[in-house]
Image (cartoon, rainbow, N blue to C red):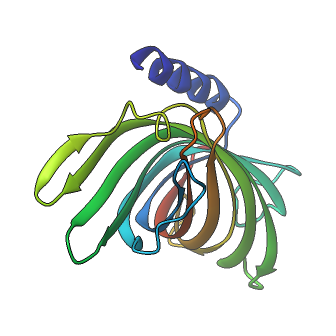
Amino acid sequence: MMQRVMLILVLLVSQSLFSQELFFNLGSNSTVYNYKNSLGQSNPNLRSSTGSFYEFGYEFLFGGASSSMESNFSYAASLTLNQFNAKGGDFNNTYSWNTSYLGIQNAVLGTVVRSSKNTFVVKLKAGLNTSTIVKGEQTLNNMVYDIKNHSEFKGLLVQPMGGVDLRLELTESILLSAGYNYSKAFNVSNKSSEKLGFSTHQIQLGLHYNIN
């Protein structure tokens, strides 16, 4: 796992030689588990739950723009940490699943609204996140179990996403952003009869620093 993390960081640092903005986002995930057991039956007692989201990366600007406030199109590469959580229960049991996934996200952004003086912009975003679980726990009636190595959780998670970013210029070098993303995640390496995916609504706040 450490080797994967180092490889991710090396890739991001090498890309930063050509980058024009550094950014950090954090926020909240509201996740619904899409779970089917070995008989293909879903669990009607599962409910959405919240978890944290962190993202660190670089944004590359096209068209010679000096900042993302001026660019029409850009590409962002980042390291992400997502918590995908759920809870449920019936008359006999209460349970919750809490998982953390470390991943790489690639996204393209296009500006659709811009103020006359480039102090406020709205961007649409589309991208793909690939991740793997780094922590997983199931709580069943106050008993905690490690689920990180369960086949429906471990392996490669692929997560297409789309959303919108609103950005406000604070200074010539610093931008403030707020955004919303929707994504659906699929475990493409799970070969077991139990299937698990996630549908996630994500709210985020961010800071962007121009490094030209």
Quadrant of the image for the C terminus?
top right
Residue at figure coordinates x 39%, y 74% from the top left: 45
| Residue 46 on image: x %, y % | 41, 70
The answer to whether residue 44 is seen in the rendering is yes
Which residue reaches farthest left? 142
Q: Is residue 93 above or below residue 81?
A: below
| Residue 3 on image: x %, y % | 46, 14
Which residue reaches farthest right? 63
Q: Is residue 39 above or below residue 169?
A: above
Residue at figure coordinates x 36%, y 69% from the top left: 50
**In the drawing, does residue 94 fall left or right of residue 63?**
left
Residue at figure coordinates x 71%, y 32% from the top left: 18
Which residue reaches farthest front? 39
Which residue reaches farthest bottom? 116
Q: Toward which corner of the image does residue 197 lie, by quadrant?
A: bottom right
The answer to whether residue 59 is seen in the rendering is no
Residue at figure coordinates x 73%, y 71% from the top left: 123
**In the drawing, does residue 172 fall left or right of residue 27?**
right
**In the drawing, does residue 151 fall left or right of residue 145?**
right
Q: Nearer the viewer, residue 164 or 103?
A: 103
Q: Is residue 79 above or below residue 122?
A: above
| Residue 171 on image: x %, y % | 51, 67
